[in-house]
Each structure stands twice: as structure tokens, then as C-alpha cells.
Amino acid sequence: MMARHYTVLSPVEHDGERYEVGQAIALLEDAAAALVAIGAIEQGTAPAADVRKPKASPGAADADPVR
């Protein structure tokens, strides 16, 4: 079973992570059903890029940009 992509409409906590309004979340249909039913999420499209920003690696700010 594949995960589907949803858009958060009301703050949600899932698997110990908090998702804010407008963020994308990928869930199995069974896990999403109750959240869809109460209007906390709606089915959306796969995000072009991960909504969450990855943590910068140490020293990344000091690196020279690639030109």
C-alpha cells in the first residue's frame, strides 16, 4: 500500500512530529481517513520539494557557493 499526499488544514501531530497548516504530509489511506473526516487534512498533490527544511550540515554556511 502506498502513501498518499495530503495538505494539513489544522495542526496535526503524527508519529511524534507536528505538522502545521499548509504543510504536506504523506500517510496511508487508513491512517488518514479519520483526519480527513474531521477536516484536519485534505488530499493534495505530491510536493515539488520537501516542505520541511533539512538541517544544515556543520560548516555548510562557511562553504563557498558553487558557481
Image (cartoon, grey):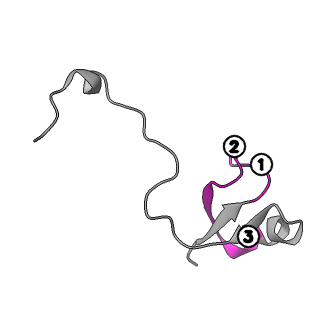
Tell me whether circle 2 and circle 3 mark residues in contact (CB < 8 Å).
no
Tag shown at residue 11: 1
Position of residue 56 in the picture relative to residue 14 (left or right): left
Q: Which amino acid does label 2 sit on?
A: Arg
Residue behind mark 2? 18
Percent of width and height locating residue 52? 52, 46
Tell me whether circle 1 and circle 2 mark residues in contact (CB < 8 Å).
yes
Q: Going 74% across and 73% down the picture, which residue do you hit?
A: 30
Foreground label between 1 and 2 = 1
Dot 2 falls on a residue whose secondary structure is strand
- What residue span does the magenta drawing correspond to? 9-32
Percent of width and height locating residue 66? 13, 39
How many residues crowd mark 2 within 10 Å: few (<14), some (14–19), many (20+)?
few
Dot 3 falls on a residue whose secondary structure is strand
Q: Going 70% across and 75% down the picture, which residue do you hit?
A: 29
Dot 1 falls on a residue whose secondary structure is loop
How many residues crowd mark 1 within 10 Å: few (<14), some (14–19), many (20+)?
few
For residue 45: magenta? Answer: no
User: Alpha carbon of mark 2 to alpha carbon of mark 3: how far?
Assistant: 16 Å
Foreground label between 2 and 3 = 3
Q: Which amino acid does label 3 sit on?
A: Glu
Percent of width and height locating residue 25? 62, 59
Tag shown at residue 21: none
Task: Answer with the quarter of the image where residue 59 lies.
Answer: top left
Q: Going 87% across and 71% down the picture, which residue do you hit?
A: 37
Toward the bottom, the furthest residue is 1
Tell which circle, 1 or 2, labels the residue nearer the N-terminal end: 1
Q: Which amino acid does label 1 sit on?
A: Pro
Residue behind mark 3? 42
